[in-house]
Amino acid sequence: MKVVILCGGQGTRLREETDFRPKPMVPIGDRPILWHIMKHYAHFGHKEFILCLGYKGEVIKDYFRNYLWNTCDVTLQLGRRPGIVYHNSHDEEDWQVTLAETGADSMTGRRIKRIQQYVAEGETFLLTYGDGLSDIDIAASIACHRESGRTCTISAVHPAGRFGALKIEEDGRIHTFVEKPQVERAFVNGGFMVCDYRTFDYLDDSENEMFEHRPMLDLTRDRQLNSYKHEGWWQCMDTYREMQYLNELWNRGKAPWKTW
């Protein structure tokens, strides 16, 4: 299945980084968060990507156009017969990446509608955001979608708490403290969606069309919106603090999303 990744937002809550690059290009370790998302999908065998570009999309284009240059050690032969030797091998040689300009100011619905031409009629595709990581089982989410027979399946996840959770005894003694716990009851849309081609019928080319508003309400009204409950790890990267948290997990070798 093709993997559609929304990469065009301005990331206004992460201005420390996104003044210079689009949020999907903010690094976790030495690679952009977009690369980590793509590696997770590739682990499940999905290696055809469609990136919906917008804000500073040229940065993403440059990264993939010069992928070997950006990821390998290089020897340059100078002089009248110049040459380049790339020394490192990598596991991304069989990836196919379509870089689609979907509008600088487009909302998510319009971005998805504009890549319809790259999805074969009747084909199911995968869809997610360019700023969220998870250890989600992609194969299980696809199986859940197929079993439901509905048009669109979103992954329902527990958002991480923004504050430490305390368990307090009656006398005021703190019994347990958990930093950034997963919220146990609430579910939110964590991305990692599975969409039938019919999803495009719920979208139009309006610049202000947000997939999460009218289209999802219409899908819900028509009983065509399904959920795959993911009880494992999930984390978005909306703030500088969350970026630091993800980098800390990666640098310590404790990244739950590293499935490859």
Image (spheres, grey):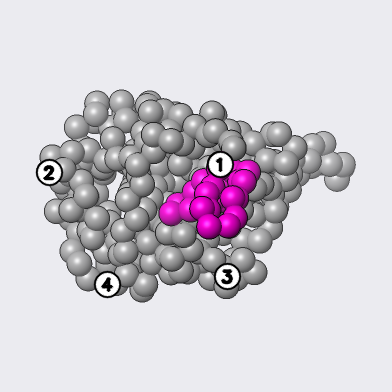
Q: In the image, is residue 83 part of the stretch drawn in magenta?
A: yes
Q: Could you tell me how far apart the alpha carbons at marks 3 and 4 are, in whole angstroms? A: 24 Å
Residue on which disc 4 sits: 207
Magenta-drawn segment = 64-86
Looking at the rendered structure, the secondary structure element under dot 3 is loop
> Which-is-in-front pick, marks 2 and 1?
1
Q: Position of residue 10 (x, y in %)?
A: 47, 69
Residue on which disc 2 sits: 121
Disc count in the image? 4
Q: Quadrant of residue 94?
A: top left
Q: Is residue 241 left or right of residue 106?
A: right
Q: Position of residue 36 (x, y in %)?
A: 53, 42
Q: Residue at x 49, y 32 (%)?
A: 91
Q: Residue at x 59, y 37 (%)?
A: 87
Indicate the amino acid at tag 4: Glu
Q: Are marks 3 and 2 in contact (CB under 8 Å)?
A: no
Q: Are marks 4 and 2 in contact (CB under 8 Å)?
A: no
Q: Could you tell me how far apart the alpha carbons at marks 2 and 1 are, in whole angstroms? A: 39 Å
Residue on which disc 3 sits: 20
The quadrant of the rendering that contains the N terminus is top left
Pointer 3 local density, CA inside 10 Å: few below 14, some 14–19, many at least 20: few
The mark nearer the N terminus, 2 or 1, is: 1
For the residue pair 229 and 7, the one nearer the viewer reads as 7
Indicate the amino acid at tag 3: Phe
